[in-house]
Image (spheres, rainbow, N blue to C red):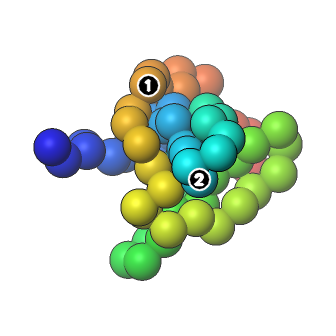
Amino acid sequence: MSLSLHNYNIVRVSDGKQITNCTIVRMCHAHVIVKYEGRKYKLPYNLIDKVVGHELLMPEE
């Protein structure tokens, strides 16, 4: 199974113990930048379990 990822997808992230929904902010070659509770985190792609939605509101920058 493959995932089709785009900026602003809401993804389910799992480290094997905890499952969290995050919003993708930026995609890089080896990792993805996600936003969770107002903070940004760098995660490897293998922690993304599945796409669960799409963020319709674009952030102000």
User: Splitting the image into 4 quarters, where does residue 23 fall?
Assistant: top right
Q: Badges 1 and 2: C-beta atoms under 8 Å apart?
A: no
Q: In the current view of this chain or complex, which residue is farthest to the right? A: 38
Residue, disc 2: 15
Residue at left offset 62%, top offset 36%: 19
Q: Tell me residue 43's x, y (percent).
A: 58, 64
Q: Which amino acid does label 1 sit on?
A: Val
Q: Looking at the image, which residue is at 25% across and 44% down?
A: 3
Q: Where residue 60 appears, x then y in whole percent?
A: 73, 40
55 or 52, nearer to the observer: 52
Disc 1 versus disc 2: nearer the observer: 2
Question: Relative to residue 37, is residue 7 depicted above or below?
Answer: below
* Screen quadrant of the N terminus: top left
Q: Is residue 12 above or below residue 33?
A: above
Residue of label 1: 52
| Identity of the residue drawn at 83% across and 38% down | 37
The numbered mark at residue 17 is none
Kind of element beneath mark 1? strand
Give the x, y percent position of residue 57. Answer: 61, 24
